[in-house]
Image: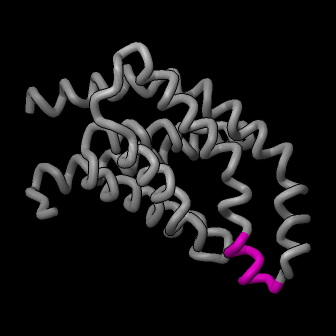
Amino acid sequence: MKLNVREVVVFGMLGAVMYASKVIMEFLPNIHLLGTLTIVYTIVYRKKALYPIYTYVILNGIFCGFAGWWIPYLYLWTVLWGAVMLLPREMPKRVRPFVYMTLCAAHGFLFGTLYAPVQALLYGFGFKGMIAWIAAGLPWDVLHGISNFFCGVLIMPLAFVLKLAEENS
């Protein structure tokens, strides 16, 4: 996956857009465009979407601290990227938005569960402690999943605009 100079710049900017969108929306708990943007980048750039995704992850660590909370970010967004990569590229046009919105929502609903194993290892929770940690976060995961579903409305329009920009560059 060799990159040219243009791609390095574009992927750096797209990663910065992810980070900026998170910062701008921080006043709304668990409501953000990160899942939406991860899916959009994956639709448009496929394997190369990992570059802006990990640019975001690294920016998050730089500005918010490379601490225990950050470690799951090394795989959380890759799970969503991988799920999009497994979907057929040519889905019926009517189905695509709903599939992507549902996948985005599922990632939000499962965020705490995906996050929990690393927290359990880092902080010495046993299995019961990890389950309690997941249960305590369920209301936030429900909010996260619902908001991801509605933010997912932007996936197809953003993918269209990004593909158009790529074709005209």
Position in image of residue 53 (x %, y %): 40, 55
Frontmost residue, 77 versus 13: 77
Tell me what residue is drawn at x 73 percent, y 67 percent. Answer: 116
User: Is-magenta flag for residue 55?
Assistant: no
- Residue 57 in the image, given as x and y percentages of width and height: 47, 62
Residue 144 in the image: state x and y as whole percent.
Answer: 70, 40
Quadrant assignment for the C terminus: top left
Residue name at image x 61 percent, y 34 percent: 148
Q: Quadrant of the N terminus?
A: bottom left
64 vs 156, left or right, is right
Of all residues shown, which one is farthest toward the bottom?
124
Position of residue 43 measured from the top left corner of the image (x, y, whole percent): 32, 38
Most common secondary structure along the magenta stretch: helix
The residue drawn where x is 68% and y is 64% is 115
6 vs 100, nearest the viewer: 100
Asked if 63 appears above or below 150 in the picture, the reply is below
Measuring 42% from the left and 54% from the top, which residue is drawn there?
A: 82
Q: Which residues are magenta?
A: 117-124
Left or right of 134? Residue 38 is left
Q: On the image, which quarter does residue 132 sit in?
A: bottom right
134, above or below 24, in the image: below
Does 120 appear in magenta? yes
Q: Along the line of sight, which residue is nearer the eye, 82 or 14?
A: 82
Q: Hey, which residue is sitting farthest top in the picture?
A: 94
Say which quarter of the image contains residue 4.
Answer: bottom left
Please state the total of marks drawn on the protein image.
0
